[in-house]
Image (spheres, rainbow, N blue to C red):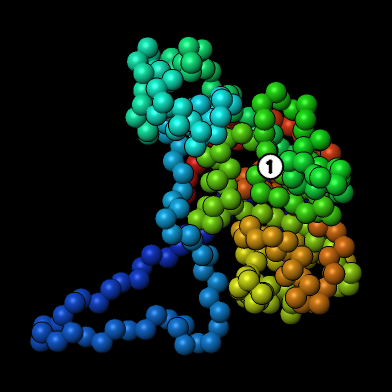
Amino acid sequence: MLVMNTRNSGGNRKKSTTNSRPSATSRSGKTPAKSKPAGENSGKPSFRPKVRKGDPLPSFNEDEIRLNKYLSNAGVCSRREADVLIQTGVVSVNGQIITELGYKIKPGDVVKYDGETINAETKRYVLLNKPKDFITTMDDPWGRKTVMGLVVKACKERIYPVGRLDRDTTGLLLFTNDGDLAKKLTHPRYEAKKIYHVETNKPVTKEHLELLLRGIELEDGPIRCDRAEYVKDGASAREVGVEIHSGKNRIVRRMFEKLGYEVVKLDRVQFASLTKKDLPRGFYRHLTEKEVAFLKMTK
């Protein structure tokens, strides 16, 4: 069934792009009346994913990289601080001082800062099966356990979580120092698939499963599941598998709370193309080159 399958799902749905525009004028020279989009006055909420304007998907051109990003990846400073260093003339590429913002370097270029050769940080990708009672943050002022303590020995590079899972939620959490990939996986247009195994305090009715598929209205807008079904035939109706693409905070818990259920257990069993197969709770592993390449593929 939905959440028990640990293999990658290849069933990507194609979005319709068949909407056509009427011509500006008809043969008679008169401008035809504009037709209203389907469902405009139906009174039903729209469940199209919202995309922030001016924030396109990042590109993954590995042949060239901006100089400020290279310095940031190497741990010298932030990108904004790197721009200041570049403008002050303390950064050189292949022996030539570079003061141009936006300058791109190629593989094999020798970058020096204040006379010292800079080596960019190796990209790392670590997948954790998060246990309960750990919060998803880099550090906590109240001394609570964080997920960073579970991956502290994974690599020498500084990695950070992609998205978040709340304290009581278990399951897959990806860590990386690849800012472009992290942005891509959390971008609304990428729609990274997330599958959760949900256990509630009482049986979930079939009517509510259907409502999750049609969509419900929350305080921050409409939301729906792409799939929602009982975990397996004959199992308790308190265990449900849901597939969503939204990255909103506590979205699964809030959906069930809206329908009158309390989520007693929540486990993320799939994130994008990654599954929990052969990864025990509380353990982590590094992604393979094939897995990383698949994550970087755009739609």
Looking at the figure, which quarter contains the N terminus?
bottom right
Residue at point 46%, 27% (across, down): 85
Q: Is residue 106 visible?
A: no
Of 96 and 188, nearer the camera is 96
Occupied quadrant, residue 247: bottom right
Query: Which residue is outermost to the left?
Result: 28
Under mark 1, the amino acid is Pro
Residue at point 78%, 54% (across, down): 166
Of 109 and 271, nearer the camera is 109
Tell me if residue 57 comes above or below residue 241 in the rendering.
Answer: above
Q: Position of residue 278 (x, y in %)?
A: 78, 37
Residue at point 53%, 76% (across, down): 46
Numbered disc total: 1
Occupied quadrant, residue 227: bottom right
Label 1 SS: strand
Q: Is residue 107 left or right of residue 181?
A: left
Q: Position of residue 74 (x, y in %)?
A: 56, 24
Q: Is residue 141 visible?
A: yes
Q: How crowded is mark 1: few (under 14 residues within 10 Å), some or many (20 or more)?
A: many
Of 14 and 191, nearer the camera is 191
Q: Position of residue 177 (x, y in %)?
A: 61, 34
Q: Is residue 15 left or right of residue 99?
A: right
Q: Position of residue 296 (x, y in %)?
A: 52, 39
Of 111 and 233, nearer the camera is 111
Tell me if residue 66 comes above or below residue 163 in the rendering.
Answer: above
Residue at point 74%, 45% (across, down): 137
Occupied quadrant, residue 232: bottom right
What residue would you read off at disc 1? 161
Tell me if residue 45 comes above or below residue 265 in the rendering.
Answer: below
Q: In this view, does 283 lie to the left or right of 126?
A: right
